[in-house]
Image (cartoon, grey):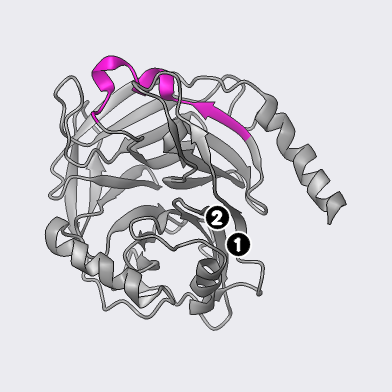
Amino acid sequence: MRLGLAALLLIALPALAQPVPELKLLSEHPVDGMRGGNLSGLAMCGDRLWTESDRDDDLIYRLDTSDTVWKAENVHIDVPPVPDTGLPLMLRAVGKAASVIRGGVLDFEGITCDAKGNRYLVSEGFAAVLQVPVDGAPNWLKIDPSVIQEAHAKGLLRKFNAIFEGLAINAAGDQLWLAAEREHRGILSVRKRADGSWGCLPGTCILLNEGGTRMQPSQFPTPKLASRDFSDVSLYKGKLYTLERNVYQICRRDAKTAVLERCWSYAGELLTTPRQYAQEYGLEEALVIDADGAWVGVDNNEGARNDGEKRPIVWRFAAPDGGWEQP
């Protein structure tokens, strides 16, 4: 056990010891046309970006990116009843009650695509994953409830509005990663079984489970300790990239173990005075990584930033010097 822990520390320490380089902002794109606002995920399907809102249960959006201001094109989805996922009844009940005021009982918090263009959305309200096929009706993945029960028993998925905040799927569409948001945060992975259900061997579902706090970046108006969190996850060339909004960083992790390898900061660009929001925590909830850079989107809760902009925004950052795969 001690040798195993030491080995993990040796892997992680080089990443932790390195200074965190700043990413360069290339462009920003306000998004018009989202009925519920609250952009809460991004996915690249082929050559088109898609998004969703955590306030809309019956819509996803295809993004028209032909101009500086992007247009969200409504795509209606008929969502079937949610199956029992293993999430405790109390958490589901609190989510339903909150939706009466804010809308969005499903609380979609992430979207991803496989190589065929099938879209997958994660419901924070029910800890469930909806598949929206290219052809055919939407359906809930049959994730073994023991996965959620194990995560809950080990300290994950215990707080309302802090359940699953992002997901990624491999090109073949048979392995899924889920990002548990905070207090504790974690990474879970499940695979598709021969019978069409999704699960994992006992004790292997949870790749990462951690609590604690980290200091917000110095550019924040009044930096303080904030919970370690994940607000989205993206899969690129066999690596997981996590959006860690409370510290304004994108981090690369091993897809098999979720061990931290390298991080990059976007605080220098998004915490300039005009782009700041009058809120106490980071608001970025959407991430797509590709060879040339990163797309990062904000769920601003319909609040205005200092320059008066109230629409959801997607930013384009250049890939770091040396690429995402640098040591």
Region in magenta: 262-278
Image location of residue 33, percent across then percent down: 13, 43
Rendered-image quadrant of the C terminus: top right
> Is there any visible trace of residue 197 in the rendered image?
no
Rendered-image quadrant of the N terminus: bottom right
Q: Nearer the viewer, residue 36 or 278?
A: 278
Of callouts 2 and 1, the N-terminal one: 2
Question: Is residue 242 toward the left or the right of residue 10 in the image?
Answer: left
Is residue 271 part of the magenta span, yes or no?
yes
Tags 2 and 1 touching, CB below 8 Å: yes
Report the amino acid beneath label 1: Ile
Is residue 312 part of the magenta span, yes or no?
no
311 shown above or below 49: above
3 shown above or below 32: below
Image location of residue 198, percent across then percent down: 52, 74
Image location of residue 29, percent across then percent down: 25, 29
Residue sitting farthest toward the top = 273
> Is there any visible trace of residue 32 in the rendered image?
yes
**Rendered residue at 76%/45% (across/down):** 8
212 shown above or below 74: above
**Rendered residue at 27%/22% (across/down):** 275
Residue picked out by circle 1? 206
Q: Nearer the viewer, residue 79 or 70?
A: 79
Question: Is residue 18 toward the left or the right of residue 4 in the image?
Answer: left
Image location of residue 57, percent across then percent down: 21, 62
Q: Nearer the viewer, residue 159 or 46?
A: 159
Q: Which mark is residue 187?
A: 2
Question: Is residue 63 toward the left or the right of residue 126 in the image?
Answer: left
Q: Callout 1: 10 Å neighbours few (<14), some, many (20+)?
A: many
**Rendered residue at 46%/57% (across/down):** 114
Q: Which mark is residue 82?
A: none
Report the amino acid beneath label 2: Ile
